[in-house]
Each structure stands twice: as C-alpha cells, then as structure tokens.
Amino acid sequence: MEQEFYKSNKLNKEKMHQLLPKRNHPASIRFLIMFTLFLATATMVVLCWEQSWWKFALALFGFGIMGCSLFACQHETIHNTAFKSMRLNRIAAFVCGVGHLYAPTAFRELHFTHHRHTHEPGKDPEISLGAKPLPSIVATLPAYMGWISGFSLLMFKLMMLFFGALGMPDIIRKRWFPFIRNAVKNQIAFESAVTLCVHAGIATMAILFYPGFWGLFIGQAVSHCLLASYLIMEHSGLPHKGTVLEKTRSIKTNSFIKLLMWNMPYHAEHHAYPGVPFHALPKLHKEIFNELAHKEEGYIDFHLKVIQSKI
C-alpha cells in the first residue's frame, strides 16, 4: 500500500525518499530468528504435554508470544514492505498465515480496508461486522474481558478460514465479509484450504501418534489471547472522526516488544505512512513525534485504565 493518509510538513520529498526504500536484509534476519523460535516453542509444547504443569504452561506462553510475532510479520509482509523482494513477502506472509491461522490474501483485504476507513463504524472491518457497527470492546467490562480472552478473534479467523476454503459463498461474503473482493476468492480458497489441511494433519498426529500435538491447539488459544490484549490498544477508546493520528495510538514500550512485533508499536506512524518499511518506522517516529496525538500510554497503563473505569 503506497497511499499516504497524513501529510506532515516536516517530511519533504528528500526525507521520504530516505524512509521508503525496502531492504531484504533486516527482514531476513528477523524472520529466520522468529520462525526458528516459533518452531522451537511448538516443539516444547508437544514435548511438555506429559511434563509438570508449569513446564507446559511456560511452553504455551512461549508459543503464544511467538505466534504474536508471526502475526506481526504477516502484517508487514501483506503490505509488501518487509522485504524488497515481492516473492519473499508473499512466501513469508503465507508461512506466517499457516502458523497463525490467517490466509494472507483475506488478511490483506481486511487490513487495507481498515487503512482506508480507519476506526469508521460500519466501514472499518475491525469495528464492524457485515458493514454494521459493533459495540466498542472497551464500553463495558464484560465486552473488554470477552475481547482479551481472544475467543472472538480466534473464532472470526476460523470462520474466515472455513468459508474461505469453501470459496467464500456470496451469501456469506456479503453478510459478514463485504471487504473481500470477488477477484481474490480463489486465492483465499487455496490459502485457507492449505492452512486447514496443515492443522488437520496436526490433529491426525495427535490422534494416531502422540496426544502432545493437541497442545498446539491450546497454544493457538493462548496466542490469540495475548494478541487480542495487544491489538485492543491500537484504536480502542479513540475518536471516530479526525485525522488518522487522532484515531490511532502509538504504544510506549520496550525494545524487546518492538523487536518481537516488527515495530508495530509505532502504529500511528504506520497508519499515516503505510508504505514506510518496518525498519524505518523508528526514524519516522522521530520525524513526526510532536504531531502524534496518542503516544505516552503503555500496555499496563492502558489495561489498568480500562479496568478502573469500569469498576
């Protein structure tokens, strides 16, 4: 996505030319480390199935964290900005999607619509269902707790996979997934079918060979709980009108989270200039820092504020 959704007076053409170039090297190193750790934690989950509960819990937590990193990598690669190579972007997006239950083309359709209609009720698919606005997930304590459980996020993605594999029938697409274009339904069908087959294979191994493979499905639930707790901060509680910087929150966090999440905490910056690669977002952050409307809140502060306001 090369479209820009904000114009900063501090960014002239020369500075933008410095920020926009794509590179293979930063993403290649990060992807290899991330996916190796994902496979390692997946192996730990399987092997710890019959170990003590705390070993299994630690393995699940590690797997959940690396699952979030897969989502972040897929987010960058569907923008085709993680790597300079288009082929590498497509491969990484597909591999991450299989690991985290998200067909990349379906994600791209949803996410690009989200960029074009950020935080607009009835238009932004992140806060709408079938072009109808959804209640705010921070409006009530039950809504907040329901969201951070990860259940609704996981169910939504499973529905997209299931109906995507069926070819996204029009009656379903128009009612629940209107952001998906007819032109990409076949691609979504292929990606969804492969993802479902891989996880069906894991279930088969759990039944026929070793029940520890069931732990990977529990790990998916843990991962989506962690991911939902992260994603809730990006726009929730912010105005539905105004500039994209007024409707989007950048998150104050540490270097480890930025590394793990492919610099996604620079979220307002990304929404303003989605064509800027992840490795250049820290520079973009410095350039437009004074223009950011929401930048001082960290994860713990945000969640505590929501809980305290509802008690």
Image: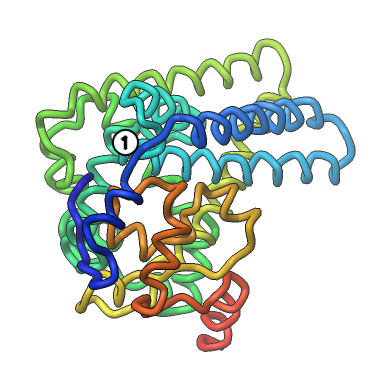
What's under tag 1, amino acid-wise? Asn
The residue at 41%/73% (across/down) is: 289
Q: Nearer the viewer, residue 296 or 55?
A: 296
Q: Nearer the viewer, residue 189 or 287?
A: 287
The residue at 66%/39% (across/down) is: 63
Residue 141: x and y, percent? 50, 77
The residue at 29%/25% (across/down) is: 165
- Figure check: 197 above or below 280: above
Task: Check the image and tell me how it is coloured.
Answer: rainbow
Instruction: Describe the element under mark 1 as helix, strand or loop.
Output: loop
Q: Is residue 182 left or right of residue 56?
A: left
Q: Is residue 72 left or right of residue 114?
A: right
Q: Nearer the viewer, residue 158 or 108?
A: 108
Q: According to the image, label 1 marks what residue?
A: 80
Residue 11: x and y, percent? 27, 64
**Placement of the C terminus among the 4 image quadrants:** bottom right
The residue at 59%/28% (across/down) is: 32
Q: Is residue 81 left or right of residue 210?
A: left
- Figure check: 60 above or below 299: above
Residue 174: x and y, percent? 12, 44
Label 1: how many residues lie within 10 Å, few (<14), some (14-19) or many (20+)? many
Residue positioned most to the right:
52
Residue 177: x and y, percent? 20, 45
Quadrant housing residue 126 = bottom left
